[in-house]
Amino acid sequence: MNLVTVSLGSNINPAQNIRYCLDALSDTFGALQISRVFESEPVGFSDSRNFYNLVVAFHSHWTPGELQTWAKQLEITHGRPSDIAKFTPRALDIDLLTVGNLCGTIDDVTLPRGEITHNAFVLQPMAELLPDQQHPLCGTPYATLWDAFTLGDQRLWPVDFRWRGRWVSQTDQQPCFATARR
């Protein structure tokens, strides 16, 4: 079994859509490790609606292709057209970040995903959730990558967020990582 990480994002009814996705992930893969939820300004989008973003980790024996197919099907089932333009609002965005220590293009999926080291809305929750875990390509722990990250114009902040009756994220606390089971 590999440790799989995915980033989740939404800027259309984000709280509702993120909860829907967490339910589907938990129902399919079991126990989840969930980062805090961050609100972030859109990067590259002309639409000014902010996103909710987070990182989720779980264990799976599925191949990268199977994971990618499942994620894209969930997006479509939840109202995201398969031919959506790159920088348009979305109810649900699920990106496969890592599958264990796999590197390269496997099943037409490039691992690890480049966004990890380029976007604060991916790297900060990843660094908080798995601080000592090493990036599969460069071997540097995520916390170290975050410490060296230059935020630039990217802005994000934690938000209060509850899922299945428990706090996943609170603005007035240090990072707290929810682990949920079915």
Image (cartoon, helix red, strand yellow):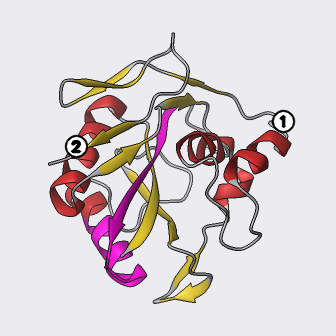
Above or below for 173 versus 128: above
Q: Please name the amino acid that badge 1 sits on.
A: Gly
- Foreground residue, 68 or 123? 123
Q: Nearer the viewer, residue 158 or 11?
A: 158
Q: Position of residue 18 (x, y in %)?
A: 32, 40
Residue drawn at 80 percent across, 36 percent down: 151
Q: Is residue 51 magenta?
A: yes
- Measuring from the top left, give residue 62's x and y in whole percent: 31, 79
Residue 114 location (% of width, % of height): 67, 65
> Would you place residue 61 above or below residue 43 in this image?
below
Asked whether residue 118 is in view, the answer is yes
Q: Which residue is mark 2?
A: 20
From which residue to which does the magenta span run? 49-73
Q: CA distance from mark 1 to mark 2?
A: 32 Å
Magenta residue check for 86? no
Question: Vertical placement of 153 versus 9: above or below?
Answer: above
Which residue is situated farthest in the front direction here? Answer: 132
Percent of width and height locating residue 65: 38, 83
Residue 86 placement: quadrant: bottom right
Mark 2, secondary structure of its residue: helix
Q: Is residue 79 left or right of residue 157?
A: left
Q: Is residue 78 visible?
A: no
Please name the amino acid that badge 2 sits on.
Answer: Tyr
What numbered label is drawn on residue 152? 1
Tag 1: Cα neighbours inside 10 Å, few (<14), some, or many (≥20)? Answer: few
Crowd band around label 2 with a 10 angstrom C-alpha radius: few (<14), some (14–19), many (20+):
some
Q: Residue at x 21, y 57 (%)?
A: 30
- Residue at figure coordinates x 65%, y 58% from the top left: 115
Residue sitting at x 76%, y 61%: 140
Q: Where does the N terminus fall, quadrant-wise?
A: bottom left
